[in-house]
Structure formats: C-alpha cells, structure tokens
Image (tube, rainbow, N blue to C red):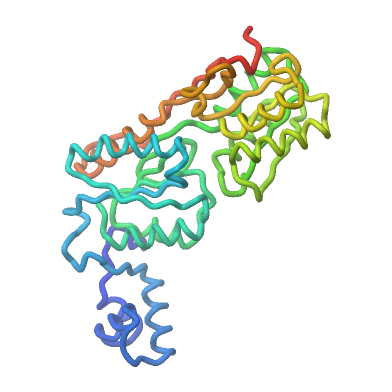
Amino acid sequence: MSSRGKVITLQEVAVRAGVSRMTVSKVLRGAGNISAETRQRVKQAADELGYLPNNLAGSLSSRKSRMVAVIIPSISDIVFSEVLSGINATLRPEGFQTFIGESLFDPQTETELIRAMLSFRPAGLLLNGGMARSADAEKLLARRNCPAIQLWDCDGGALDFSAGPSHEQAGRLVANHFLERGLRRIAYVGAELHKDLCARRRYLSLKSALAAAGIDLLSMICEVRPRQAVTGRFLTEQLVLAHPEIEAIHFLNDAMALGGLSYLHQAGISVPDQISVIGFNGTSLANAVRTRLTTIDMARTEIGEKAAQALLQIVAAEPMPGAWRAALEVVQGNTTVPI
C-alpha cells in the first residue's frame, strides 16, 4: 500500500527498528553513543518507511507552508531562468516564495535536492522532466506529501501536472523543415543525451521522421562534453571533416548551433547555401544581429506560469487537466533557405 500523502513519524521508525523514539532521534541527528548495528537498523527503517526529517521543527505543515521547492538543471541557462521567472511571477503575488536547487542534470544531485527540499514540507515541488532519475528519487516522489509538477516536458511523467513542449513534436518539425527544402544529407550534433532525455527524445524523433522518408541521419554526439557553444564548434568540425557531403545540421540547442556556425564561417562554408543549420529553444533570437539562427522557439516564461498556476489550483483543490502543452514554432532565420 502506498504511503504517499502520509507523514512518517519518528515513532513509526522506532517501532520498525525496535528501539526508542529518543534513539531514533539521536541516530538521525548523528548524536549519542549508539552502536553501529543500531544506527544501521534505524537508518534502514527510516529508508524503508520513507521518513523525512522536518527541518522546520514542526513549525510548518504541507497545508500551511508558503514555500515552493523548485529544482531546475541550471539557473545560468536562460531556458530555465525564464521558466523560473514565470514561476516566481505567478506564485509571489499569491504569497508563496520559491527556494531553488540546481541538479546540473546529475541524478544523484537531484535525489539529494528532492530529499532535502521535501524535508521542509513545502506547499509544492516543481522539477524538470526528461532527466535520468534515480530509483531513490522515484521512491521519494512516490511518497511525497505535497503536489509535484513536471517542468519542460509534456510527453510523459507520473506527477500531478506537466507543463512544457512536446520534444517528439520538435524533432518532427525539424525533419519537415529540412525535407521541405529538398535536403537529404542531414546530420545531428548533440551532447550529454544520457542525461538530457528531452534532448534524446527530440533526436530520436528526428531520426525516425527522416527514416520514414528513406534518410539515414548522421550523428555526432559526445556524452562527456557540455551542451555549450564550444562543444558545438568542436563537433561540427569533426562532422564536416568526416562527412563533407553534409547539407544540413540540427543542433541540440541554440548555444551549440552558434558554436557550429562559428566553425562553418571560419572554414569558409556558406550557410545556408552549402549547409543549412537549425537550433532549438529560441534563446539566440533576442541577440541576433547579422546571423539569425533558424530555431524552434516556444514561450518559456509561460511554461513556468502554467506550472505555477497548476500548483495553485491543486493546493486549492480545484479540478484541472493533467498537462499543458507549449506551442512550438519554427522561426525562420537566415541559416536555412526560405521556401
């Protein structure tokens, strides 16, 4: 039977471990002269029951808390900072405050953040979807005693609400954009797809759509380099040197695309006459001057707003759907040929 929604007490841990409530308290605080065997038994009981210490010492409960926990991959990434801006703009007027954690796309870091944040008994938890999540994190989420909202991904997830784009649709949009222009020798450049499962779904969707048209997608993917411009530049050089026949490249994000473009321009390869380029996420649009990257854009701030609105509705016990899908738009720049 699921224990979700139930706050596990020290007394329940004590009963499971066969010790006193005071012993449990000392073990979990790292205090007292207690044997290693007893400590291990108490910690195992706490883990099995899903016990979370209340770091606010009982001053708040999930019903009264005005704090909302938010876990995003990176505050410095403009995509997630804009999502966060939408969250804050919606929650603060309603008297809620957010406290933020960065997972850096690392499953263990995310698990530690979920554990720590749930211990504060927040009013809600908002966290990024499409990540490689640990079994411990899944267990914590299953036993949470507050609403949980998935950000940046509406294709899947077992939380209370999802707000974000369809990454599978994004892959199909890129494929159609290239195919409509008669491009056949198409490549993908990306990084860390084992961590960023949303990016991986875009990639697989692109690959599938092209395969349906009889095209084999060339891939240049590095799992150990960051998803940044410097990696886009490096991988584009490797790709072009190995496959000079390439006519089009889709990059994991705009940052990597701009890095790739810097190499193509330096190498004297004309864009889009020789190679067409498409990015993803639209973050380059605000700073475009001469080079206007063709990209897949969406309302990133609105994703945060919709997620926060959903949380408010759940807290107020109002009926609502299970997901909101952000509209995707191919923004034509000068890195692909208009039709």
Q: Is residue 132 above or below residue 46?
A: above
x and y, in percent, of residue 334 in the image: 61, 14
x and y, in percent, of residue 55 in the image: 26, 66
Compared across the picture, whether 215 is left or right of 250 comes to right
Compared across the picture, whether 265 is left or right of 172 comes to right
Q: Pick whichever, 118 or 269, lies toward us.
A: 269
Quadrant showing the N terminus: bottom left
Compared across the picture, whether 105 is left or right of 266 comes to left
Q: Pick whichever, 11 or 241, lies toward us.
A: 241
Compared across the picture, whether 296 is left or right of 182 comes to left
Answer with the quarter of the image where residue 145 lies. Answer: bottom left
Quadrant showing the C terminus: top right
x and y, in percent, of residue 54 in the image: 26, 67
User: At x 49% / y 24%, what residue is drawn?
Assistant: 287
User: At x 44% / y 24%, what residue is drawn?
Assistant: 327
Q: Pick whichever, 311 or 14, lies toward us.
A: 311
Residue 211 shows up from this direction: no
Total marks shown come to 0
User: At x 40% / y 72%, what residue is drawn?
Assistant: 47
Answer with the quarter of the image where residue 312 lies. Answer: top left
User: At x 69% / y 20%, what residue is drawn?
Assistant: 276
Q: Is residue 226 above or below residue 265?
A: below
x and y, in percent, of residue 59 in the image: 16, 63
Residue 229 shows up from this direction: yes
